[in-house]
Amino acid sequence: QGQLVESGGGLVQAGGSLRLSCAASGRTASNYNMAWFRQPPGKEREFVAGITWNGGSTAYADSVKGRFTITRDNDQITAYLQMNSLKPEDTALYFCARGSRNSGVARGPVWYDYWGQGTQVTVSS
């Protein structure tokens, strides 16, 4: 079985940037849609951004649109989340997830079957 491993989280001041990476092993992510979710303290997990298996389509939560960018490198079987203009409300545990190969990006966690362990992002004001 493959796995997903996130990295790149950390502590950053408001207005700063971070780049998260999600490395897949065992062909876990090739030819599959990928997405980033986050779970703020005391809240439910929420969709952040997603990308189709071939990178042809992306989707973003309204709260991050224009600030975050999701990309993927299928040769390296890695997904990225570039986060700019970070705000304190972006503070959360960020997860990457694998979903079924599809022409569109699903936003509900139920559509994703493989999850990483998460990487913490903390934005100070």
Image: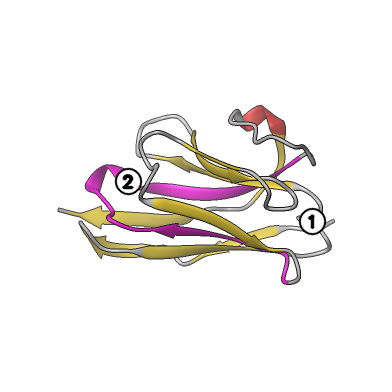
- Residue 4, how many percent across, how many down? 68, 58
Q: Which residues are magenta?
A: 76-99
Q: Residue at x 38, y 42 (%)?
A: 64
Q: Is residue 86 magenta?
A: yes
- The residue nearer to you, when weighing 90 against 33, is 33
SS class of the residue under badge 2?
helix
Percent position of residue 42, x then y: 36, 32
On residue 28, the disc is 1
Amino acid type of the residue that numbered disc 1 sits on in the rendered structure: Thr
Name the residue that disc number 2 marks: 90
The amino acid marked with disc number 2 is Asp
Marked residue nearer the N-terminal end (1 or 2):
1
Quadrant location of the N terminus? bottom right
* 6 sits to left or right of 4: left
Q: Which residue is at 46% across, 42% downward?
A: 38
Distance from Cα at disc 1 to Cα at disc 2: 27 Å
Residue at the spot 64% in from the left edge and 32% down from the top edge: 106
